[in-house]
Structure formats: structure tokens, C-alpha cells
Image: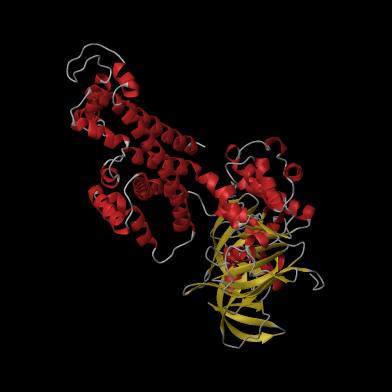
């Protein structure tokens, strides 16, 4: 991600207050052109507020928003070359599917035949040409979703905003739509800003993710970056599943903090920040980065006993009670069974981790 | 039927109460309708079926008076309902679409209060108002009074409809480059139409039917159908009154049915 790429949306110090309540607290971020960008966070974290500020439905209390270099924070929504896919789709019920898709083009001043022709092409792109003359209510949820997408893409916006558009669909349809959205983004080359609370969805689809919580940006980075190198406890906990262990720093050697967990367990983690000897910090390690053995592989093997194995299709989750310590979740992929062993409940085991897997988190 | 006692949905005695209520409500209407077809000068003796009193309404000695009154009633009802519906639509848009403002519940109270105030009080107040500003009583004063008291009747169905329309539709329209005005006329108004039609019909019926306020503000020499009927009845009830009443009843039933069908058809969509 080089800095020479064009910036599509530049949010600078954006604040949103409703009376005494601060929904968004000084958020700054840049979204690149032609990027699939996701705002991810639990409900009430400010992600939708930020999206609606970019769309123009919410006023910016403080700060500025630039679209390809132009300040847009004071423009009404109809003057911004961005379009939105709404959570409830908001298809106009009194119009046909074709007229829905043509609406934006017509409002932009294109002639009726011209905008209908372009709308027809858009419907072809989302494979709904056969439904052009139907009313939205006569379509299934997934079809309505695609109409909403076609309607928002038809005027060729510079940026497409998607407000949890897949949340009303069932799992299978959602997975299919995730792929379709990703393809559409590649095909059209339009910048997508996608809002979701589903971290798995965010990881699957996004080029980059902004993790938000309590109105503030927690971490911004590529999907993999965020998953493997979370900056803080919130991100580590919210993205995927993790083992968060409270530890005390004993010594720092070659950029690694050697920590004690209590019960005689020793483990080390890598940290980007300075750590103080004696500090209480957390170590985060993903369940799939742990493996079990019946003898310690190095000094950091954690002694414990298998409580149970849970089979879940592609992998097996093992709960291990550490001796005089917390319990750990260990995940073994079924394709990994050749290298990694599964132990019966009750077996005494050592839990080991790859050196790079453990992350030290300050807060 | 012995098992009905076990049915938790059955309440003993309700059927009888229902019958009594229906009887009290509809028996007089039924009597008027049946006797409007009576071929007799008396309103009590039945002398066979005929349409002579309907003919009398349109060509009898009182027909001129009733025709003029009907013309007044229908023109006033159409104009009053149209104006009141327009005002109510704008009021509903302002009340429901402009977010939470400080005096919102007070405003709603002010709009719907006339529904709760005794009509006679409104009538006296309206009369005093017209006198104090020096309006000559006549067609104009009736019209103004009707517009005023029709607004809350038109407002309720329109506001109810608008409350059910999510704000995202207008936002979507504006997001797709429509101006605020276009978003209103192209998207919101068509979606509100069933409520607007219901509001209009309700206002129309209420205006057509009004007696008390009209009687106070109408002045001499001008009648609407209800005041003309009342005037006739004071000189003794004749069968032609029953014919007129039946015709009015027919108009009301027709309008209410239309209003019902319109709101129903929209809901099943």
C-alpha cells in the first residue's frame, strides 16, 4: 500500500456530537481509490455515523471530509458523487425495478430513455434483467439487495457506501453476496466503503479494515495485519478468537518480553512498544497458533490437562486447563492432523506456541 | 356446541350485547331507508313501495331549496377537504420529518385538540371570531370554518401513514441526486398517497355532515344540506326528508368504502 496511491476519502479529525453524547471522537483516516475498505466494530461504535457523515446524512460537528481533494462536509447529499446501499435497501415501492435503478441517472439530468437504457445494463450486471418490470416487493431479499446495489452503482459514483447491506440475508446467501460484492468492486474499480459488525465478513472481503470502538479508531490496516498483529486488547478480542492471558513482565531480551503467568508458567511475547519490567500486561495468542505435545518442546511449554475436544467440521477445538492457571483454547485444523496431535480428554499435555504467535498488549 | 364453554376465546353473553348494540346503531337507519320508499304522505303508514319521494326531492316544491343546499354542501366539502388535506400533509411532513423539536408534543396537541373540544364551543368561538374581525356571514365564513375543523380529521390518517415510512426512502432519493423537493414529490408523496386519500375523504364527509358550526356561522339566506334538512324538519317530518337522508347515507357509505379499500390495498402490498 504505497502512499503514492490516490486518496478517495480523507477524513480529518471528524467529530460527531449529539448534545452531550459524542458518537465519533476525532477520527482521521484515508481511504484509497479503488479500495475495498471496511469500517468494523460493535453496534454503537460510530461506524455507521461515520458512513452517514460521508454520505451527507449527518452533519460534521468538527473536522473535515475530503473527496478526491474536495471538501464535502458542507455539501447536501444530492451534491456528493457518492451513493449508498442502505441496510433496509430503501427501494422505492411504487416504482418498477428498472425505474428504481434509473432514478439516480434521471435526477442527474439524463433523459428518460438514456437513463433507462443504462439502468438496463446495470441490471444485467447484477443478473436481474428478467425482473426489470417487477415491483421491489415481488422480489426475494437477495434480489432486492442486488437491485439496491445496481441502483447505487448506476450513476457511477466515485465512492460506494454500504451500510451493513448483508445483515438481513441468511448465511448461505450472505457468503455468495460477499463474493459478488468483491467481484463487483474489482470490475467497476469503484472505491467501496463497507460497514459491518461481522469480523469474519470484514476479513473475507476487505483490502483494509478500520476497527472502531466507542467512537474512536482502534486500528487500521490490512485484514491479515489486524488479525495477526492487533494493537490492543479490544482489537485482539474483537477480531477472531484469541487467548488473552494476563502476565507479569520478568525481563526483556532481543525485543521479546519474557513473562510469567503464575503457576510457574513462563511465556514470551513480541511487542512493538517499550515494556517495563514488572508491568502487568496481556499476551494474545490465536488458538490455531497453539499446538500440543506430550513433552515440552522448549522452556516455554505450558503444562495442562485436556478438558474436552469439540469437533466443528473443518477443525477441532480443544480446551486445556493449565496447571494452576487459566484455560486455553487450542484449535487444530483437520488438514493439519499429520503434524499436530489431538489428545483424549484427561491427558496431560504441554501447550506450545510458535515464537511469532504471541503478541504483548499494553491495554 | 357444548364444548364452546372450554374455548378460551368464547366469552358468554357477548353475542347478545353485540346484537343489542347493532340494533341500536342500525335500526333507525334501516327504518329511514325503508320508509323513504313508502308510497304515502304519512311517515308512519306503509302504503307500498315507490320512488315518488326521490322524485319529489329532485322536482318537488322544495327541490329548489335542496338543490341549492346540496350545491353549497358539496362545493364547500370539496374545497374545504382539499385545502385541509394540503395543510395537513404539510403539517405532518413538518411534524414527523423534521426530527425531534422542542414543542413537538404541544404542536401535536394543538392540531388534534379540536377533536376533543365540544363542537358547540368551537361553533360559538368561531362565530365570535368572525363577528370581531367583521366578516359578513355567508358562504365564505362557512368555508373558512370547515377548512379549520377539517384539518385534524385529515391530519390523523396522513400522519399515521407517514409515521410508517422509514426516513431512509427520502435519504435514498437525496443520495441519488434528488433535491429535497424532488425527494418529497417523487418519493415521499406517492408513498403517503393512501393516507392522503383517506384524510381527504374523512375531511370531505365531516364537512358534508357538519351541522352545529355551519348553523352558527352560515348567516341568513344560505343553507347547506344538513341545515336545510333541519329547517324542513322543524315544519314537520315529511317522507322526502327520509329520501334525502338515505341519499346522504349512500354517499357516506360509498366514500368510507373507497377510503377503506384504498388503505387496505396498500397494506397488502
Q: In the figure, A25 relative to A255: above or below?
A: above
Residue A242 lies in what quarter of the image? Answer: bottom right
Residue A80 lies in what quarter of the image? Answer: bottom right
Relative placement, left or right, of A263 versus B146 is: right
Residue B107 lies in what quarter of the image? Answer: bottom left
Residue A271: where, in percent of width, then height? 67, 79
Hey, which residue is sitting farthest top in the picture?
A: B48
- What colour-coding does the image apply? secondary structure
Q: Nearer the viewer, residue A244 or A259?
A: A244
Q: Residue at x 34, y 21 (%)?
A: B59
Residue A54: where, in percent of width, then height? 64, 65
Hey, which residue is sitting farthest right in the picture?
A: A4
Relative placement, left or right, of A96 versus B96 is: right
Q: Residue at x 61, y 88 (%)?
A: A276
Q: Nearer the viewer, residue A224 or A308?
A: A224
Figure quadrant of the N terminus of chain B:
top left
Residue B248: where, in percent of width, then height? 33, 30
Q: Nearer the viewer, residue B155 or B209?
A: B209
Q: Is residue A86 visible?
A: no
Q: Residue at x 43, y 65 (%)?
A: B101
Q: In the figure, A335 relative to A330: above or below?
A: above
Relative placement, left or right, of B266 versus A259 is: left
Number of residue marks: 0
Relative placement, left or right, of A226 versus B191 is: right
Q: Is residue B78 visible?
A: yes
Q: In the figure, A280 relative to B20: above or below?
A: below
Residue B259: where, in percent of width, then height? 42, 36
Hey, which residue is sitting farthest bottom in the picture?
A: A277
Amino acid at each position: 500500500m504505497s502512499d503514492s496511491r490516490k486518496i478517495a476519502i480523507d477524513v480529518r479529525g471528524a467529530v460527531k456530537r449529539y448534545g452531550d453524547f459524542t458518537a465519533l471522537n476525532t477520527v482521521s483516516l484515508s481511504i484509497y481509490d479503488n479500495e475495498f475498505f471496511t469500517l468494523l466494530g460493535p453496534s454503537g461504535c460510530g461506524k455507521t455515523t461515520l458512513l452517514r457523515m460521508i454520505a451527507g446524512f449527518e452533519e460534521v460537528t468538527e473536522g473535515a471530509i475530503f473527496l478526491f481533494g474536495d471538501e464535502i462536509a458542507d455539501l447536501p447529499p444530492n451534491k456528493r458523487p457518492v451513493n449508498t446501499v442502505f441496510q433496509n435497501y430503501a427501494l422505492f415501492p411504487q416504482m418498477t425495478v428498472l425505474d428504481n435503478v434509473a432514478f439516480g441517472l434521471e435526477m442527474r439530468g439524463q433523459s428518460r430513455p438514456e437513463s433507462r437504457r443504462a439502468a438496463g445494463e446495470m441490471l444485467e450486471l447484477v443478473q436481474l434483467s428478467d425482473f426489470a418490470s417487477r415491483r421491489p416487493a415481488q422480489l426475494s431479499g437477495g434480489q432486492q439487495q442486488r437491485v439496491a446495489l445496481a441502483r447505487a452503482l448506476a450513476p457511477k459514483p466515485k465512492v460506494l457506501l454500504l451500510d451493513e447491506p448483508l445483515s438481513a440475508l441468511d448465511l448461505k446467501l450472505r457468503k455468495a453476496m460477499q463474493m459478488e460484492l468483491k467481484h463487483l468492486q474489482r470490475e467497476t474499480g469503484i472505491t467501496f466503503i463497507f460497514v459491518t459488525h461481522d469480523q469474519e465478513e470484514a476479513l473475507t472481503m476487505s483490502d483494509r479494515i478500520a476497527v472502531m470502538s466507542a467512537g474512536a479508531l482502534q486500528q487500521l490496516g490490512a485484514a491479515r495485519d489486524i488479525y495477526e498483529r492487533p494493537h490492543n486488547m479490544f482489537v485482539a478480542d474483537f477480531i477472531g478468537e484469541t487467548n488473552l492471558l494476563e502476565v507479569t513482565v520478568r525481563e526483556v531480551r532481543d525485543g521479546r518480553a519474557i513473562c510469567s503467568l503464575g503457576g510457574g508458567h513462563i511465556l514470551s511475547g513480541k511487542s512493538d512498544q517499550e515494556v517495563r519490567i514488572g508491568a502487568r500486561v496481556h499476551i494474545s495468542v490465536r488458538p490455531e497458533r497453539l499446538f500440543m505435545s506430550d513433552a515440552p518442546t522448549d522452556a516455554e511449554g505450558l503444562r495442562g490437562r485436556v478438558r474436552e475436544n469439540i469437533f466443528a467440521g473443518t477443525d477441532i477445538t480443544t480446551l486445556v486447563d493449565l496447571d494452576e492457571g487459566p484455560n486455553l483454547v487450542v484449535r487444530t485444523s483437520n488438514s493439519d492432523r499429520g503434524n499436530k496431535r489431538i489428545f483424549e480428554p484427561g491427558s496431560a499435555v504441554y501447550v506450545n506456541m510458535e515464537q511469532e504467535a504471541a503478541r504483548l498488549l499494553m491495554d | 356446541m357444548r364444548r364452546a364453554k372450554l374455548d378460551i376465546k368464547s366469552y358468554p353473553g357477548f353475542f347478545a350485547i353485540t346484537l343489542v348494540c347493532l340494533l341500536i346503531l342500525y335500526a333507525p337507519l334501516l327504518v329511514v331507508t325503508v320508509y323513504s320508499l313508502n308510497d304515502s304522505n304519512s311517515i308512519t303508514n306503509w302504503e307500498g313501495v315507490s320512488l315518488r319521494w326521490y322524485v319529489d326531492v329532485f322536482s318537488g316544491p322544495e327541490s329548489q331549496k335542496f338543490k341549492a343546499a346540496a350545491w353549497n354542501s358539496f362545493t364547500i366539502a370539496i374545497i374545504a377537504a382539499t385545502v385541509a388535506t394540503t395543510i395537513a400533509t404539510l403539517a405532518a411532513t413538518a411534524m414527523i420529518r423534521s426530527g425531534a423539536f422542542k414543542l413537538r408534543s404541544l404542536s401535536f396537541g394543538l392540531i388534534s385538540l379540536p377533536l376533543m373540544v365540544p363542537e358547540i364551543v368551537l361553533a360559538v368561538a368561531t362565530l365570535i371570531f368572525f363577528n370581531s374581525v367583521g366578516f359578513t356571514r355567508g358562504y365564505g365564513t362557512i368555508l373558512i370554518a370547515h377548512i379549520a375543523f377539517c384539518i385534524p380529521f385529515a391530519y390523523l390518517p396522513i400522519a399515521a401513514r407517514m409515521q410508517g415510512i422509514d426516513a431512509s426512502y427520502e435519504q435514498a432519493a437525496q443520495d441519488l441526486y434528488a433535491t429535497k423537493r424532488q425527494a418529497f414529490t417523487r418519493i415521499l408523496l406517492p408513498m403517503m398517497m393512501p393516507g392522503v386519500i383517506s384524510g381527504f375523504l374523512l375531511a370531505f364527509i365531516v364537512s358534508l355532515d357538519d351541522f352545529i358550526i355551519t348553523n352558527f356561522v352560515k348567516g341568513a339566506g344560505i343553507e347547506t344540506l344538513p341545515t336545510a334538512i333541519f329547517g324542513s324538519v322543524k315544519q314537520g317530518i315529511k317522507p322526502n326528508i327520509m329520501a334525502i337522508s338515505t341519499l346522504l347515507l349512500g354517499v357516506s357509505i360509498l366514500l368510507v368504502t373507497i377510503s377503506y379499500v384504498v388503505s387496505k390495498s396498500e397494506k397488502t402490498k
